[in-house]
Amino acid sequence: MPTGVGKTFCQASMVARDIQKNPNEFRLYVVNAPRILLSYQLLREVYSFLLESNIIARYSFVHSGSSADETELENIRTRIEKENDIEIPFSQIGATLNVEGITTIINKAKQQNLPLILFSTYNSAEKIEVARQQTNVEIAMVLNDEAHYLVQERFYDILNTLKANRCYFFTATMIHTPSDNGRGMNNEESYGKVLYEMLPVHAIRIGKMVRPRLHFVTTENIYNTDDYNKSLNKIIVDVFEQHTQVLKKTNQTPKLLISTRGTQDIIDFINSNEYTQLRCKGVDVYVVSSSENVGNRINDEEVRRQEFLKRLKQDGEDKTKKILVMHYDILAEGIDVSGFTGIMPLRTLNKSKFLQTYGRSARPDKDDRPVIDAIVKVNGYMTKDDWKKLNKPYAYIIVPNITHTNEDDKENTIQLITELRTYDFNPSEDIIGSQITKGEIDIEEPDIMNEQPQILKKVGVLIDRLIAELEAERLASMSNIELAKELLK
């Protein structure tokens, strides 16, 4: 299922249903994720869902991160108590990475006769299996989020490590190998059959995802990569200003997510005059990377990962906030922030990374959801006239096309978005060895850059003229059938 259409909801409901079928007894569940940051979000969503279902359980993390933010969870518990006029007992939620700690948590849940849900990273899951054997318990269910990570050699053994009665895999992009007997997700012996699949184009048609719209920033002249590097901070500021202008038509506040080429891009920007310039204009700048030189920063403040995610979600939903978020390979998967209006990748993305990154901005506006639900309930799908009724009709993919080396990036992005709007987009990729490869795409994109060329302000002596090219709304709003006819012409 594409990013943002309900995979976490499915996982929470599966755990809740199994607990309700087996009331008043200890049962062990494991929820795996590739990143610590994602495991925090998964716990919060499952915790909320179970409390809403009047289910009492115990929870714990199994990874090297810190324990949960109990203040946030307490607010959830208190809210649900008041709304349902019930009393929900407090349950401390810790984190451990040693087998002894896990066995202690398991034994305590067994004594209390309560279900236990462990939220683990793929790196730490093997510790759960050791503890399971020592405590002589069964795992009722394993849920693997962002399961495409499991095709990597360092994680693949988990499929045979965790012994569970049932094991499920959730992903937006299946990863295949040439052989059905390899470590790809087409190996039914390892992964089983596909139980359910939603194509991105279907998610768009029923309003679960916002339609993509292209916005290129390019130069009239050609400059080399060194020029690009030196001017990148100026490009970022100009792109943010251009994005702000484009959004005025729908009265949206810019919330731009930038996938950088590496940590150095982030370091250079937060130490630049351009960063100060944006801050003076009231833009909140979020940056995150696994590098200690960046960490998790909101403006000039270093915060914990959980605090970073909490405030990012709050600011994402706040329509008065202008935000710029820069990350390096951290926020691509699974992070629940609904407010992004656009993304700008500074490097070539393969199909899976593109879909994950686009998914960060593809979530509908919170106030649009009731409108979408009402339309889909009557008609079964959204039309281009329906999209015009929304606060957020499009999610913008901004591509900086600065040098000759970016031409391939530009064409690759056009092809991916053309596929995304039609049934040609198969959200799976092939791997050969440990490398992910891009397949050949032989669809020609019509001339889409014809609606709104604009000359930007000077951004320095190296890049002295930028032109923003916005995709024509006629093409951006086309249905998959209309687009197919256009392509056939």
Image (cartoon, helix red, strand yellow):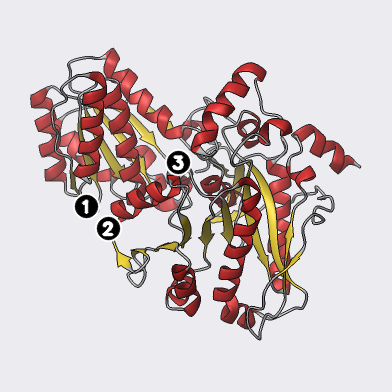
- The foreground one among 136 and 14 is 14
First-in-chain label (3 vs 1)? 1
Q: Which residue is mark 1?
A: 66
Disc 2 versus disc 3: distance between alpha carbons?
Answer: 26 Å
Crowding at dot 3, Cα within 10 Å, few <14 / some 14-19 / many 20+, comes out as: many
Residue 377 located left or right of residue 287: right
Circles 2 and 1: CB atoms closer than 8 Å: yes
Q: Residue at x 44, y 51 (%)?
A: 153
Quarter-of-image position of residue 452 = bottom right
- Three-letter amino acid code at the position of disc 2: Arg
Disc 2 versus disc 1: distance between alpha carbons?
Answer: 9 Å
In this rendering, which labeled residue sits more in front, label 2 or label 3? 2
Q: Which residue is mark 2?
A: 304
SS under mark 1: loop
In the rendered image, the residue lying farthest to the bottom is 461
Quadrant in which the C terminus is drawn: top right
Q: Residue at x 58, y 28 (%)?
A: 372
In this rendering, which labeled residue sits more in front, label 2 or label 1? 2
Quadrant in which the N terminus is drawn: top right
Q: Position of residue 243 (x, y in %)?
A: 61, 58
Q: Position of residue 67 (x, y in %)?
A: 20, 48
Where is 142 relative to 257, above or below?
above
First-in-chain label (2 vs 1)? 1
SS under mark 3: helix
Circles 3 and 1: CB atoms closer than 8 Å: no
Residue 163 showing in the rendered view: no
Disc 3 versus disc 1: distance between alpha carbons?
Answer: 23 Å
Q: Which residue is mark 3?
A: 147
- Three-letter amino acid code at the position of disc 3: Ala
Q: Position of residue 144 (x, y in %)?
A: 39, 37
Q: Position of residue 367 (x, y in %)?
A: 51, 35
- The foreground one among 223 and 84 is 84
